[in-house]
Image: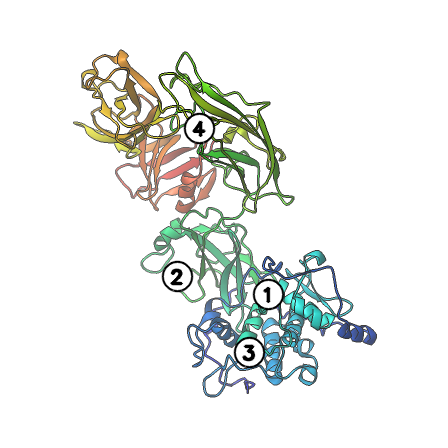
């Protein structure tokens, strides 16, 4: 039998309390004991009727597609509540191990005298009463309101239906109208969950058939709250007995909806990009007015968050919730509310690799140290959802007729083109959409679009200029006119999902597959397809052509079997910048890729690389190099000029010589250009005028700014000894680097520095980054 523990009884050892914090000049932390008086007194007739009736309500039976509508976003079983309580019969692989350990942490069980918990044994009536009394104590609820006369009237051993009734009572007694959700009793004694509408209420088929209305509603309420999962096939098995292990799982899931949280400070994620900080006393009760300090660091740089002596490396940290002094308890730090919780708001800048958020509490003037007791942390991997400001439409393959570098102008027959409608938000720090717009979630009403797809076929096309499907030349691509009629017209509806994404597909088959294309006869087949997207609201989810593959909401794609022809190139330097040589020369390497109208690499095409400074590529030394089987070629060269922004251009020639001696034979390949930065460092100490950001390397603390075809870009080096300003406000090093990394679709964000000394790092410089719309 489960033993009642005495105050001096043999409870599992718990960690000592974390020092409870308060601002010395502020209000004392207040212990909040949340109680609700005994469950509502019902008229005898109504109560009897509700207990005897097996009723129905506007709800649906559970099936494989059902999901709880009000599951808890956080848990009571975190941090210290996950420790092993050393029950000898609860193995590491036991299904209810975590729940049993959590139950013991909250002092709901001490197990048996022989060190066992006996998870597979049925729960007796007396044990269930004891468990629920202790659960009520942990949740700050009225035990009498929960247990009532169950000791005399309840089943023994306890059935699942009775257990559900007791746990539903626990949640009625421990949640309030401020709770989300709030569990209440209706006038007839049935249970309701504040955030679940009647039409969304689910029920277990066997519970609805066999239990009275109160018991049935208790089982349904626990399902909606994520406490009860059923026994499979939409059944609850209310008449089955409950094992002690299963009982532990039910109670700990229910505690997630109460204020019960581990002693001290815990931090949990309650939504993407969001956290909740909880502060509790030694009895797991909420501490109101506890001062909380919250700060964060990118998880990949977690090893830089603290110094060797355990103190905070403050320049690498960012205060959250408006905190400007991370790692120190001060007058501007936030305090917990009556719930003992604090929400610092959205955690911004969750980059790939995650962001680790820390929280702690202490007295005014206290400073945190790494590993100090009470320092809680969590690593976030998802950013806060972004509100939609527009819809971006893209095609894959990325068909962009005449778009230059890496543009795909035609699609082979049989290829499936996937068109994606993705909701996006404003570029961070601006009020407009652009190339750096993040993905967004749909508005409450959702986003639905009508797509019209028109197509028309042409067989055995021929043309006197050899452009068999209207492709045009590489320098003068042919334009495609949107279809307004078409042989075939299809209309479909596309609704974006919860991530703001919706897709549809386009394909076309060769209308005359038995006719082999004959270059000698100059005939090909092609199909023109135009899709048009209508719907959405401007400023919310309407298609934005500036960031899409569309024009006025439409795009035309041509499927063809025309032979491959050279169309364009891309030029990619191995690195973004190099130091301009002071004497002699410096080596650089670039990769050139040549592609056809289908986006495939062109093998054996001859490429000549030139620069904006003719001395780098003397006319007589411009050698043509052939592309490999992937259509690429690596070209190295030596640079002996001064610091400038160099324009590199991939060129081709009409004939096939191995050495080019006549500049007139060189033609720039469409799209085949790139900028390269030959940088210099400031020659003297002083202020550096703000200029456009060219390149950033946060691993080396380098930012390259300014420059032109005749002036050197400046290479600036910063460190945590410097001061930083972001968009007019003082900032930490971490915030400065985040500003450097943010999207800059217009390429005109600037950086400047005051009191910069290129030869003495001990001098404190003041770096300013400004976002220019």
Is the residue under label 3 in contact with that under label 2 (CB below 8 Å)?
no
Q: Is residue 430 visible from the viewing direction of this image?
A: yes
Tag 2 and tag 4, C-beta contact below 8 Å:
no
Report the residue marked by disc 4. Answer: 513
Of marks 4 and 3, the one in the foreground? 4
In the image, is residue 283 above or below residue 751? Answer: below
Q: Which mark is residue 369?
A: 2
Mark in front: 2 vs 1: 1
**Frontmost residue, 712 versus 666:** 666
- Compute the Cα span from label 1 to label 3: 20 Å
202 or 84, which lies in front? 202
Residue 62, placed above or below residue 509: below
Give the CA distance from mark 2 to mark 1. 52 Å
Between marks 2 and 3 in the image, the one whose residue lies nearer the viewer = 3
Identify the coloring.
Answer: rainbow
Rendering coords of residue 690 (x, y %): 39, 31
Q: Which mark is residue 243?
A: 3
Which residue corresponds to the image point at 18% horizontal and 27% vertical from the top-left?
A: 585
Residue position for label 1:
233
Residue 387 image-quadrant placement: top right
Nearest to N terminus: mark 4 or mark 1: 1
């Amino acid at each position: 039998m489960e033993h009642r523990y005495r105050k001096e009884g043999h409870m599992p050892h718990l960690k000592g309390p974390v020092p409870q914090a308060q601002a010395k000049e502020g209000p004392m932390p207040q212990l909040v004991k949340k109680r609700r008086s005994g469950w509502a007194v019902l008229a005898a007739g109504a109560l009897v009727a509700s207990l005897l009736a097996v009723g129905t309500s506007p709800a649906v039976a559970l099936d494989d597609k059902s999901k709880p509508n009000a599951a808890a976003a956080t848990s009571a079983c975190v941090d210290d509540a996950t420790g092993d309580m050393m029950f000898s019969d609860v193995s590491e692989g036991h299904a209810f191990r975590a729940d049993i350990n959590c139950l013991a942490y909250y002092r709901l069980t001490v197990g048996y005298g022989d060190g066992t918990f006996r998870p597979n044994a049925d729960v007796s009536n007396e044990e269930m009463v004891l468990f629920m009394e202790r659960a009520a104590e942990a949740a700050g609820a009225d035990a009498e309101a929960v247990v009532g006369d169950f000791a005399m009237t309840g089943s023994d051993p306890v059935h699942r239906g009775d257990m559900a009734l007791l746990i539903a009572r626990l949640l009625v007694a421990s949640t309030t109208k401020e709770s989300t959700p709030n569990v209440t009793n209706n006038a007839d004694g049935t249970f309701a969950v504040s955030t679940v509408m009647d039409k969304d209420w689910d029920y277990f088929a066997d519970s609805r058939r066999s239990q009275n209305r109160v018991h049935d509603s208790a089982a349904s309420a626990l399902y909606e709250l994520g406490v009860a999962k059923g026994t499979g096939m939409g059944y609850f098995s209310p008449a089955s007995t409950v094992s002690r292990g299963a009982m532990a799982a039910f109670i700990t899931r229910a505690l997630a909806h109460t204020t019960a949280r581990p002693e001290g400070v815990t931090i949990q994620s309650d939504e993407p990009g969001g956290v909740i900080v909880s502060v509790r006393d030694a009895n797991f009760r909420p501490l109101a007015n506890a001062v909380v300090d919250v700060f964060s660091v990118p998880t990949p740089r977690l090893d830089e968050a603290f110094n060797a002596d355990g103190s905070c490396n403050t320049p690498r940290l960012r205060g959250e919730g408006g905190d400007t002094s991370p790692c120190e308890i001060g007058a501007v730090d936030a305090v917990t509310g009556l719930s003992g919780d604090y929400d610092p708001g959205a955690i911004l800048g969750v980059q790939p690799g995650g962001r680790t958020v820390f929280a702690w509490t202490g007295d005014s003037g206290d400073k945190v140290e790494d590993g100090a007791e009470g320092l809680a942390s969590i690593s976030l991997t998802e950013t806060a959802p972004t509100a939609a400001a527009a819809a971006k439409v893209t095609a894959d393959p990325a068909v962009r007729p005449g778009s230059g570098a890496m543009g795909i102008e035609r699609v082979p027959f049989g290829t499936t083109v996937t068109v994606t409608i993705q909701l996006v938000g404003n570029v961070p720090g601006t009020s407009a959409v652009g190339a750096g717009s993040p993905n967004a979630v749909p508005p409450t009403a959702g986003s639905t679009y009508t797509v019209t797809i028109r197509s028309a076929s042409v067989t055995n096309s021929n043309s006197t200029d050899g452009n068999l499907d209207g492709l045009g030349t590489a320098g003068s691509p042919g334009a495609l006119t949107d279809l307004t009629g078409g042989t075939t017209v299809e209309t479909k509806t596309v609704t974006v999902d919860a991530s703001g994404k919706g897709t549809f597909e386009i394909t076309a088959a060769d209308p005359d597959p038995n006719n082999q294309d004959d270059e000698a006869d100059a005939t090909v087949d092609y199909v023109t397809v135009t899709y048009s997207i209508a719907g959405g609201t401007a400023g919310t989810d309407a298609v934005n052509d500036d960031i899409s593959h569309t024009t006025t909401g439409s795009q035309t794609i041509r499927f063809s079997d025309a032979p491959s022809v050279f169309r364009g190139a891309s030029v990619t330097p191995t690195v973004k910048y190099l130091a301009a040589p002071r004497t002699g020369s410096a080596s650089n390497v670039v990769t050139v890729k040549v592609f056809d109208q289908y986006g495939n690499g062109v093998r054996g095409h001859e490429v000549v690389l030139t620069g904006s400074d003719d001395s780098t590529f003397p006319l007589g030394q411009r050698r043509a190099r052939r592309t490999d089987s992937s259509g690429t070629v690596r070209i190295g060269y030596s640079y002996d000029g001064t610091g400038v922004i160099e324009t590199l251009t991939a060129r081709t020639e009409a004939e096939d010589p191995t050495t080019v001696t006549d500049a007139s034979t060189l033609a720039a390949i469409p799209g085949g250009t790139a900028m390269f930065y030959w940088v210099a460092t400031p020659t003297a100490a002083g202020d550096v005028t703000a200029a456009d950001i060219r390149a950033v390397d946060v691993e080396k603390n380098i930012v390259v700014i300014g420059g032109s075809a005749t002036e050197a870009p400046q290479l600036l080096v910063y460190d945590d000894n410097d001061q930083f300003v972001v968009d007019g406000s003082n900032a930490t090093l971490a915030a400065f680097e985040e500003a450097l990394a943010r999207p800059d679709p217009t390429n005109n964000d600037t950086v400047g520095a005051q009191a910069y000394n290129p030869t003495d790092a001990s001098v404190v410089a003041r770096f300013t980054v400004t976002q220019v719309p």
